[in-house]
Amino acid sequence: MARGFTPARIIDALRRAWGRVRWKIAAIIAFTGTSTLLVAGLAVAALNVVVRRESSNVVEKQIQVLLQASRSVAPAILDNAGDCMASPPNSGALKPLLAYTDEASPRLGPP
């Protein structure tokens, strides 16, 4: 064996080198993991914004449909408002209105 290259010295040199490299590797992994978590969090936040915006568009369209339906139902209700003061047997004129409102907004359960 060459002078100065004993197995004990080689092992000691490898341990010191590994000690220096180990902390660098740990720092690289920590920074990479942190940046990965930050990018994943940003992606989740962006997805949340897109989902909320789309759901608000759906709600807005539903409100527009309801407004259009109420505009077409309101004149029929107001035209027959006097019928509410009449006796109950005279409710035959309201049957088309009731059929339309049942079609426009069906009941979810038994009345």
Image (cartoon, rainbow, N blue to C red):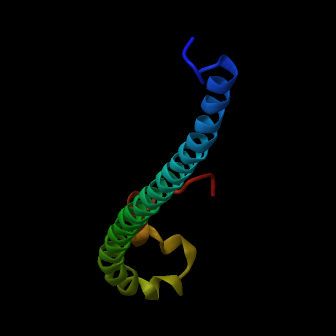
The quadrant in which the N terminus is found is top right
Q: Residue at x 56, y 54 (%)?
A: 108
Q: x%, y% of residue 36?
A: 47, 51
Left or right of 76 on screen, residue 98: right
Q: Residue at x 53, y 55 (%)?
A: 34
Image height of 110 relative to 19, above or below: below
Q: Residue at x 64, y 19 (%)?
A: 6
Residue 12 appears in which quarter of the rendering? Answer: top right
The quadrant in which the C terminus is found is bottom right
Q: x%, y% of residue 22?
A: 60, 40
Image height of 74 relative to 53, above or below: below
Left or right of 92 on screen, residue 107: right
Q: Residue furthest top?
A: 1
Left or right of 4 on screen, residue 47: left
Q: x%, y% of residue 11?
A: 66, 24
Count of numbered badges drawn on the protein:
0
Q: Residue at x 48, y 71 (%)?
A: 91
Decide which of 65, 37 is in the foreground and name it.
37
